[in-house]
Structures are given as C-alpha cells and as structure tokens.
Amino acid sequence: MSEQGLSTAYFRFYAELNDFLPAEQRQRTIPYSFSGAPAVKDAIEALGVPHVEVDLILVGGESVGFSHRLSPGDRVAVYPMFESLDVSGLSRLRGRPLRRPTFVADVHLGKLARLLRLLGFDTLHANHYQDDVIVAIAAREGRILLTRDRELLKHNVVTHGYWIRSTQPVQQAREVVRRFDLAGQVQPFQRCMACNGLLKPVAKAEVLPRIPPRVAAWRDEYLLCSGCGKLYWEGSHYPKLEAHIAQILGEASDRPDGG
C-alpha cells in the first residue's frame, strides 16, 4: 500500500490486445494503481482494452472471470481469443465461437458490411444507426458488434464485439474472417449486398420485364432479394466480386505475431 492509500497490481496484455495500449505500454508489464477492490474487468477497461476483446484472464497463474476482485500485488495476464491453442482447462470468457455468427456494423463500416454480406454473413448496417441503437441491437439479437469506436465495446450489455483495426474494407473483412475463424462458413452470393436480405432463385419469365434486353438474350439464371426485391445476375461486375472474395480469403489465415 502506498502512502497515498493506493494499491498496485501489475498487468500484461498479449498479442493484438496491445493494439489498444499507448506505445510505451505495449509488450510490457503495466503497473495499475487502485483503491478498494475493483473488478478486474473495470481495471482492464480503464487501461483501454474493451472486455469483448478478452478471452482469458490469469491472476497469479489461475484463470478468473471478469468479476474477480483485485488485490494488492496481483499479477494479471490478459489474452485475446485463442484459435489454435488448447486452453480447455481454463476459464475462457468468450465461450466457443458462435455456430453461425451474425453482425451489426457501426455507421462508419458500410463497405465492410457489404463485403460480409457478399460472403454470406447476416450483417445489419444503416447510416442512420445511432450508437445506442447499435448497442441495443447487438444485445437484443446476440449479434457481434463491429466498430472502429472502441468505447462502444465497453458497454456491459455487449457480449460479443470486435474493434476493426484497418481502414481499408477488404483488409477489414480479412480481420473479421480471421478473428472469428469464418473461412469455412463462407457462402458467397447468398445475401443482398444492399439490404442484407436472402437471395432466392427466380424464374426468368417472372422477372423478364426487369431484365435489360441485352442481358436477357444470353442469361437465364437470376436471383431475387427477398428483402428489397433487387434482381441479381452474373454480369460484368461478377469477376470483380470474385476477386474481392479471393483477396479476403487468401490472407484470412495469416496471423500477426505478438506477445
């Protein structure tokens, strides 16, 4: 206990959790001063790391939950999601990845939302969503909140979320696929990129008045959005979309080093 009545615990953050820390605190032990007995979750977020990014906390080598109360001299190791290591005997905080994850993206991630829909993932996004609406949707529907605003991820009701590091849409999509181990769940061209509705095959005769004559002359297969009614076919844009998918999946398994 210091002369000012404060106690100190010592934190070390691993791998990509260092992204949330100032440069001078990365990859090293950080002293954290506190009074009373705060929950370790509060200390982690006070140091800048949203709780939804954390999968494992060790205090003195023992795994603990977010409600664990800090004691003077505690040494706390904080880890992100493990995807390849066996930590089955420890108290993971995230649980297993959602079987078929769904997302809600903040207002700044419209292009990412379109790419995730292209890959077949249920992704809500609208330019008019306010922060409280996004948080409420994530909590109510159990969606993973995707954001460039780390403060959104600190809401207690948000149980799954991810802070997008990149500003480039294809790289953002790579991040999401890698973070949630989604490469094996990709089902391209199943959702409307505009509204997120499911695409269903439709008979050419039913939509013939909507098809440009130059397309109708050679194309017989069409998809109709069950949400907004948009009509899709393999046009000149199709190779570009396939290239986006290849770019996203081609590097989705690459993992940055860190510790």
Image: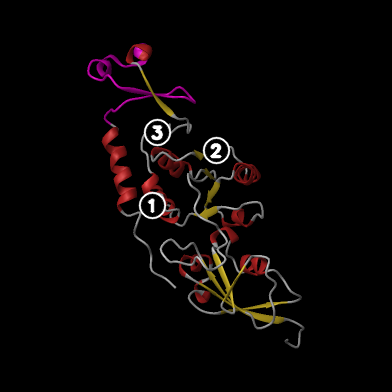
Q: Is the C terminus in the top left, top right, bottom left or bottom right quadrant?
A: bottom left
Q: Residues within 10 Å of mark 1 (few under 14, many from 20)?
A: many
**Does the magenta run of residues contain 224?**
yes
Q: How many marks?
A: 3
User: Which sits earlier in the primary sequence, circle 1 or circle 3?
Assistant: 1
- 41 left or right of 231? right
Q: Amino acid at mark 2?
A: Asn
The disc at residue 245 is none
What residue would you read off at disc 3?
190
What residue would you read off at disc 1?
174
Q: Amino acid at mark 3?
A: Gln
User: Which sits earlier in the primary sequence, circle 2 or circle 1?
Assistant: 2
Image coordinates of residue 142 in percent, x first then y, are 59, 45
Instruction: Give the Cα distance between marks 1 and 3.
Output: 19 Å
Q: Is the N terminus in the top left, top right, bottom left or bottom right quadrant?
A: bottom right
Q: Amino acid at mark 1?
A: Arg
What residue would you read off at disc 2?
127
151 in relation to 76, above or below:
above
Q: Quarter-wise, where is residue 41 in the image?
A: bottom right
146 in relation to 189, above or below:
below
Image coordinates of residue 252 in percent, x first then y, are 35, 54
Instruction: Give the Cα distance between marks 2 and 3.
Output: 23 Å
Please name whichever residue, 165 or 104, is drawn nearer the observer in this view of the structure: 104
Please name whichever residue, 236 or 57, is drawn nearer the observer in this view of the structure: 57
Image coordinates of residue 108 in percent, x first then y, are 51, 46
Q: Residues within 10 Å of mark 3 (few under 14, many from 20)?
A: many
Farthest residue, direction bottom = 3
- 137 left or right of 84? right
**Does the magenta run of residues contain 98?**
no
Look at the numbered disc 3 and give the secondary structure of its residue.
Answer: loop
